[in-house]
């Protein structure tokens, strides 16, 4: 489970582990003007072959978004309209609405997407794209 740095105890007392490299983390609660953050525990470096962690900011955000999507109790859909390519007539895909569980179901890591939300027999595939993420799933 991913957590906000300010929701856990300061320092090693947070008992957090990096989701990418499994190294223990230190929660650094910073003073005004500085961003609170997690840091890899430098003491752990000496105990083990330590490699540079591959977890980047975009990857961390993606993990957090997937956690939120999977655990949310409601989902808000915007108005979404497409234009028919031949006539340019508008086609309403969905009207703005908020759905509550069990009106929708979520599956993570399905068919190359980060999440697939199933709503009334329809599927909404979610792919979180960022620079450096090379795999893009094919839509069939």
Image: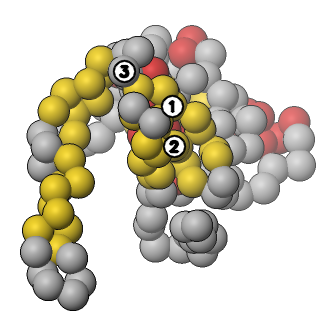
Residue 15 is left or right of residue 6, and the answer is: right
Secondary structure of the residue carrying numbered label 3:
loop
Q: Earlier in the sequence, mark 2 or mark 3?
A: 3
Secondary-structure class at tag 1 = strand
Q: CA distance from mark 2 to mark 3?
A: 14 Å
- Please indicate, yes or no, whether residue 62 appears anywhere in the rendered image: no
Residue at x 45%, y 21% (from the top left corner)? 71
**Where is residue 20, by image quadrant?**
top right
Q: Position of residue 69 (x, y in %)?
A: 42, 33
* Position of the C terminus by quadrant: bottom right
* Few, some or many residues within 10 Å of mark 2 (<14, 14–19, 20+): many
Q: Residue 128 placed where, x, y %?
A: 45, 57
Q: Quadrant of residue 35?
A: top left
Is residue 56 something that shows in the picture? yes
| Residue 19 position within the rendered picture, expressed as x and y whole percent measured from the top left | 65, 37
Which residue matches tag 3?
A: 103
Q: By what rule are the colours in the image chosen?
A: secondary structure
> Which mark is nearer the camera, 2 or 3?
3
For disc 2, the marked residue is 116
Q: Which residue is mark 1?
A: 106
> Is residue 74 shown left or right of residue 38?
left
* Secondary structure state at the residue bearing disc 2: strand
Would you identify the image quadrant in which residue 65 lies? top left
Identify the residue at the far bottom of this view.
86
């Amino acid at each position: 489970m991913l957590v906000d740095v300010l929701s856990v105890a300061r320092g090693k007392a947070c008992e957090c582990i990096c989701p990418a490299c499994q190294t223990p983390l230190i929660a650094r609660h910073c003073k005004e003007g500085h961003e609170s953050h997690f840091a890899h525990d430098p003491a752990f470096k000496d105990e083990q072959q330590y490699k540079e962690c591959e977890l980047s900011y975009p990857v961390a955000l993606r993990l957090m978004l997937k956690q939120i999507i999977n655990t949310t109790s409601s989902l808000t859909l915007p108005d979404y309209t497409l234009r028919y390519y031949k006539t340019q007539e508008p086609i309403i895909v969905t009207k703005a609405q908020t759905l509550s569980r069990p009106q929708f179901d979520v599956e993570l890591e399905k068919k190359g997407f980060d999440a697939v939300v199933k709503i009334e027999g329809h599927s909404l595939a979610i792919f979180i794209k960022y620079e450096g993420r090379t795999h893009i799933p094919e839509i069939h």
